[in-house]
Amino acid sequence: MICGIKTNIITAITVTDGHAADSPQFSDLVGKTAEHFNIKEVSADKAYSSRENMEKVFEVGAVPYIPFKSNATGRAKGNHTWRKMYLYFRYYEQEFMERYHKRSNVESTFSMIKRKFSPRCTLIHG
């Protein structure tokens, strides 16, 4: 799911059988959100760190704040968004992480959903 960081409004959600990986859902969720909202930034954890996901965020006019895995390199492999964000992450890590940590607001949204609907409600997220 994707939600607003100030409002906690869920802007897009995909329900899977619980065995599907989260990262492949990312592009569709960003696309669906962009249909109805002006996205400025998208923060996600390392599980979503891929060239394709970063490019999707850039395509909708937003900046991807997705930290890089420890084995990541700045090689663009044709993806300039990856290279640009990798360099930003490496040279301005504190500033990058301040923006990235806005994603913690989604944890509040998950908590609200669990409290509202069921103590047995299971949500898998990144």
Image (cartoon, rainbow, N blue to C red):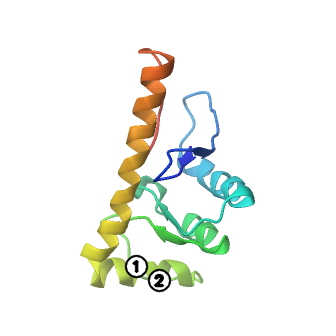
Neighbours of disc 1 within 10 Å: few (<14), some (14-19), many (20+): many
Above or below, comparing residue 113 to residue 45 in the picture? above
Identify the residue shown where x is 50% and y is 77%: 82
- Which x, y percent locates residue 120? 44, 14
Residue type indicated by callout 2: Arg
Please, what secondary structure does the residue beneath circle 1 have? helix
Residue type indicated by callout 1: Tyr
Q: Are marks 1 and 2 in contact (CB under 8 Å)?
A: yes
Instruction: From the image, tell me which residue sits under label 2.
Output: 83
Please, what secondary structure does the residue beneath circle 2 have? helix
Residues at marks 1 and 2, CA–CA distance in whole angstroms: 5 Å
Identify the residue shown where x is 37% and y is 84%: 87
Question: As drawn, which residue projects farthest toward the right?
Answer: 35
Above or below, comparing residue 8 to residue 90 in the picture? above
Neighbours of disc 2 within 10 Å: few (<14), some (14-19), many (20+): some
Identify the residue shown where x is 40% and y is 31%: 111
Q: Quadrant of the N terminus?
A: top right
Identify the residue shown where x is 46% and y is 84%: 84
Frontmost residue, 66 versus 101: 101
Quarter holding residue 69: bottom left
